[in-house]
Image: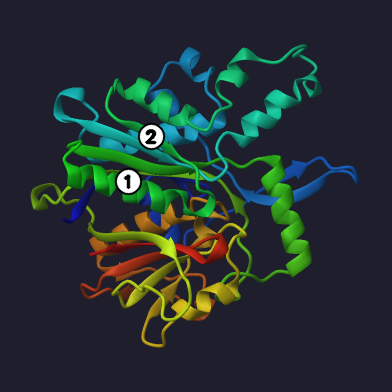
């Protein structure tokens, strides 16, 4: 059974919404912000692709937003945008809705703030609000409250394969008829610990990394959500998901998806460039867009959004592997696109879109 992508909501260092993502893919500027990270040796300046959630005030009262951490705001903004994009923000049009949130790091930034409260001179004890927001499923809980949904609600933390695992669960729910639609997405916020780890990795490995040996993308944060339904051509807005798989490569020919164009998720540190070599074939077009959204564990969610946009526009956007002078869109010509993500221990997750 095919699954239709009826709506997408994205927010990241490139901006908010699919139009902002398309502009960035077409060569629009994506400028990292310089984040100051305190260390024992002094402050270091790290380029990061940070996301702006101020537009969430259009949907939520300010007093409600004050109780939400940045991690929760990222997920909620992208989730509301996905529902709006699908035309299902009104409760009487949804049917039975399931909610699945994938995250690699969860509420890590909020956890650090809660564990070290005395660094803030205005706070003399641990904050109850920060404590209540310190669990990884806080984003899924707030999304269900904001949307007034009482259906199945699930959070998945599987490091680099969090989103492929969540997408596999969403497809299973639809196939079982458990729900009429699923709101599924990935969200990760930037923490000082992750920015510092990115800085150390860059210092140890130089300026290059990833399967193509391209420049290491800045540390990033953001959220990307999808509204999925069982195959319904009347509501098809972007593309159809024909297959999703998560597994472990145990040697021999890998379980490759049948596609002539692959989008590689190169974020995180679980997989090395050598791990991608068995998956690469000479007759396949490889693309990587990490410079648009940054280095973060749920990069495969953004890759899926880019693949869906490519199917809708029938083009392959210029990517990080192309030389600047040769960059330009290529015709997709109806070919399927596969999003591939490798994890630790030879694990993999891939999604096939048409």
Mark 1 Cα shell of 10 Å, populated few (<14), some (14-19), many (≥20)? some
Q: Contact (CB < 8 A) between labels 2 and 1?
A: yes
Residue 167 locus on image (x, y percent):
34, 49
Instruction: Specify whether 87 is left or right of 310.
Output: left
Return the x and y of residue 132 as percentages of the image width and height: 56, 19
Q: Report which residue position mark 2 lands on.
A: 154
In the rendered image, the quadrant that contains the C terminus is bottom left
The image shows residue 38 at horizontal and vertical percentages of: 81, 40
Q: Left or right of 240: which side holds 170?
A: right
Name the side, left or right, on which 190 lies relative to 338: right
- Label 1: which residue? 169
Q: Which residue reaches farthest left? A: 234
Determine which quarter of the picture holds residue 11: top left
Residue 146 is at least partly visible in this image: yes
Residue positioned 42% across, 24% down in the render: 142
In the image, 345 versus 317, the foreground residue is 345
Corner quadrant of residue 87: top left
> Residue 108's mark?
none
How far apart are labels 2 and 1 at the CA level?
Answer: 9 Å
């Amino acid at each position: 059974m095919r699954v239709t992508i009826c709506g997408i909501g994205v927010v990241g260092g490139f901006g908010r919404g699919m139009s902002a993502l398309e502009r960035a893919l077409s060569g629009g500027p994506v400028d990292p912000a310089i984040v100051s990270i305190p260390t024992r040796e002094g402050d270091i300046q790290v380029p990061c692709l940070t996301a702006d959630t101020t537009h969430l005030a259009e949907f939520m009262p300010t007093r409600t937003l004050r109780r939400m951490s940045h991690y929760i705001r990222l997920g909620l903004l992208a989730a509301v945008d996905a529902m709006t994009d699908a035309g299902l923000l009104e409760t009487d049009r949804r049917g039975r809705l399931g909610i699945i949130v994938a995250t690699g790091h969860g509420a890590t930034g909020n956890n650090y703030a809660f564990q070290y409260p005395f660094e803030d001179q205005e706070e003399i004890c641990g904050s109850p609000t920060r404590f209540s927001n310190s669990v990884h499923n806080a984003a899924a809980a707030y999304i269900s409250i904001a949307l007034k949904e009482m259906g199945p609600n699930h959070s998945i933390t599987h490091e680099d394969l969090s989103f492929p695992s969540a997408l596999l669960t969403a497809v299973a729910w639809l196939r079982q008829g458990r729900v009429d639609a699923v709101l599924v997405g990935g969200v990760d916020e930037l923490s000082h610990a992750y920015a510092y780890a990115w800085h150390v990795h860059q210092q140890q490995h130089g300026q290059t990394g990833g399967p193509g040996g391209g420049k290491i993308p800045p540390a990033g944060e953001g959220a990307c959500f999808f509204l999925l339904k069982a195959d319904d051509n009347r509501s098809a807005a972007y593309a159809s998901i024909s297959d999703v798989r998560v597994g472990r490569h145990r040697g021999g020919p890998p379980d490759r998806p049948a596609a002539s164009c692959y989008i590689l998720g190169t974020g995180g540190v679980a997989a090395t460039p050598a791990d991608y070599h068995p998956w690469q074939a000479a007759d396949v077009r490889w693309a990587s867009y990490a410079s648009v959204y940054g280095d973060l564990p749920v990069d495969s969610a953004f890759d899926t959004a880019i693949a869906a946009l490519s199917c809708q526009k029938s083009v392959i956007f210029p990517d990080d592997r192309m030389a600047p002078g040769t960059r330009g869109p290529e015709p997709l010509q109806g070919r399927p696109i596969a999003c591939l993500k490798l994890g630790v221990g030879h694990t993999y997750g891939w999604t096939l879109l048409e």
